[in-house]
């Protein structure tokens, strides 16, 4: 059993950040997320007070070295690793091995269907009907590429946080974008994907309502991102000044 950090022993936050970064990368191979409780137990030796600083430091380490960040999934007590690089097109997502390419392609299709709806939700029945049009039956348990279709979409994609699935008492459930998808797929790139599918010279601007909605969201996201960066710079500068003050005393 791991021992808790002693108050008499200096805590090496740099080592903790390195260990945590390595740990989440290994655990996130399934893309199911890393439990907060596991981080506290296995990396922080039970000291939950170190959690926020440890995650921030580990996320900064990953971002500086390989362009990834650690993000907490709201309301889930889970952390996921997401790509923080400025990807310029969906081809970045579709350049893996053939199986991954097919799976990512299916994710792109589902996300695009959700995005084009005004409420940005998609009823199960609407998704199953669309998939049937492209010769994918949702109740196919042995699809040659995807295996169990319904399980892949309703279980795996949801656990991987590409999709959110809400059950309805009086009707079919609904899908929406999951937390991971919000980081790994840009809505405007998905809209370009939709325009390319039509292949008749359409551009994202031709989808007036969706384009306007996405543009407004991008502006809002940029404002929030700028505010977060300013806060991060302030915290970093404050820590640096504190460190200099301590070393000089």
Image (cartoon, grey):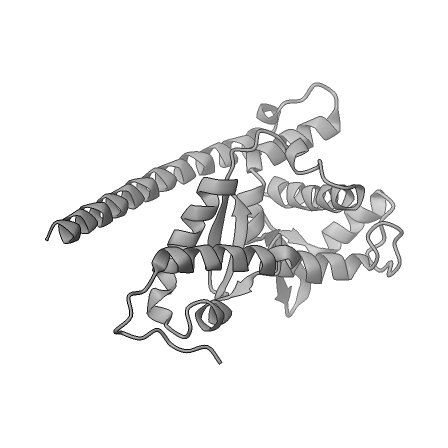
Q: Point out residue 63 in the picture as x, y percentages from the top left corner.
A: 46, 43
Residue 205 to residue 140: above or below: above
Q: Is residue 67 visible?
A: no
Question: How many marks can you see?
Answer: 0
Instruction: Residue lying at the far top in this picture: please name it.
Output: 201
Residue at 81%, 56% in the rendered image: 138
Residue at 63%, 23% in the rendered image: 203
Q: Point out residue 52 in the picture as x, y percentages from the top left corner.
A: 36, 60
Residue at 80%, 56% in the rendered image: 149
Residue 146 to residue 78: above or below: above
Looking at this view, is 80 or 189 the one in front?
Answer: 80
Looking at this view, is 245 or 9 the one in front?
Answer: 9
Residue at 70%, 63% in the rendered image: 155
Q: Point out residue 8 in the picture as x, y percentages from the top left corner.
A: 25, 73
Quadrant in the rendering for residue 143 = bottom right
Is 5 left or right of 96, judged from the image as shown? Answer: left
Is 211 left or right of 174, judged from the image as shown? Answer: left
Residue 70 to residue 89: above or below: below
Q: Is residue 5 visible?
A: yes
Q: Point out residue 25 in the picture as x, y percentages from the top left corner.
A: 56, 54
Is 83 left or right of 108, judged from the image as shown? Answer: left
Instruction: Residue lying at the far left in this picture: please name it.
Output: 249
Quadrant in the rendering for residue 234 = top left
Looking at this view, is 51 or 117 the one in front?
Answer: 51
Residue 232 to residue 44: above or below: above
Instruction: Residue lying at the far bottom in this picture: please name it.
Output: 1
Is 233 left or right of 82, judged from the image as shown? Answer: left
């Amino acid at each position: 059993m791991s021992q808790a950090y002693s108050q008499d022993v200096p805590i090496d936050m740099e080592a903790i950040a390195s260990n945590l970064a390595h740990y989440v990368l290994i655990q996130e191979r399934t893309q199911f997320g890393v439990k907060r409780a596991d981080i506290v137990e296995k990396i922080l030796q039970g000291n939950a007070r170190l959690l926020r600083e440890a995650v921030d430091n580990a996320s900064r380490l990953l971002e500086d070295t390989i362009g990834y960040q650690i993000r907490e999934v709201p309301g889930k007590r889970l952390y996921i690793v997401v790509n923080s690089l400025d990807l310029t097109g969906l081809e970045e997502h579709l350049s893996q091995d053939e199986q991954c390419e097919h799976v990512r392609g299916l994710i792109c299709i589902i996300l695009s269907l959700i995005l084009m709806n005004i409420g940005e939700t998609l009823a199960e029945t609407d998704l199953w009907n669309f998939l049937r049009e492209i010769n994918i039956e949702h109740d196919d348990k042995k699809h040659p590429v995807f295996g169990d279709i319904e399980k892949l979409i309703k279980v795996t994609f949801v656990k991987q946080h590409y999709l959110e699935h809400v059950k309805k008492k009086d009707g079919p459930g609904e899908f929406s974008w999951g937390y991971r998808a919000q980081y790994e797929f840009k809505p405007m790139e998905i809209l370009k994907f939709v325009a390319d599918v039509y292949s008749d010279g359409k551009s994202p601007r031709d989808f007036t309502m969706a384009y306007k909605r996405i543009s407004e969201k991008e502006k809002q996201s940029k404002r929030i991102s700028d505010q977060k960066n300013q806060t991060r710079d302030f915290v970093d500068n404050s820590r640096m000044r504190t460190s200099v003050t301590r070393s000089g005393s």
